[in-house]
Image (cartoon, rainbow, N blue to C red):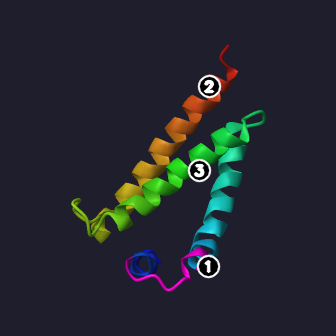
Amino acid sequence: ECAIMQKELAQPTGLLPEIQHDLLEPLRLKTEAAVREILGPGIPARRVRFCVMSIISQCIGPASGARGRRAPLQPRDLAHYADHVITFSLGGLAAIRRHKHQG
């Protein structure tokens, strides 16, 4: 999926908006629902959107950076990286939830 997007960026066919919508929109909606549930009521939509962008960026970043300066994420590292993203994201969401309840 990321390879398709990379090819489309390199040689545009005009299909990128459709690809982005079909591939990323369901993921974004599911992530947004989970973030809203974790953060609880009263969190501004902008804050939720920023959290979703942060989480999705962690997932897309390694795939899009594989051809850049960074070393690609190896298949043997995927489970460890997934655990890292989950732990890191839950920690960040917990901090935002605590901040909401402060002053």
The residue pinned by badge 1 equals 18
Mark with earlier residue (1, 3)? 1
Q: Relative to 43, say whether 76 is above or below.
A: below
- In this rendering, the answer to whether 10 lies above or below 60 is below
Tag 3 or tag 2, which sits nearer the N-term? Answer: 3
Depth check, front residue: 2 or 31: 2
Give the mark count. Answer: 3
Disc 2/disc 3 C-alpha distance (Å) = 18 Å
Instruction: Give the labeled residue for mark 3.
Output: 52
| Magenta-drawn segment | 10-18
Image x and y of residue 42, in percent: 77, 33
Q: Secondary structure at mark 1?
A: helix
**Which amino acid type is shown beneath numbered disc 2?**
Arg
Q: Is residue 72 visible?
A: yes
Residue at the spot 67% in from the left edge and 53% down from the top edge: 32
Q: CA distance from mark 2 to mark 1?
A: 38 Å
5 or 66: which is nearer to us?
Answer: 5
Q: Nearer the viewer, residue 45 or 94?
A: 45
Quarter of the image holding residue 61?
Answer: bottom left
- In the image, residue 84 lies at what x, y percent? 40, 49
Q: Is residue 26 left or right of residue 8?
A: right
Q: Residue furthest top?
A: 103
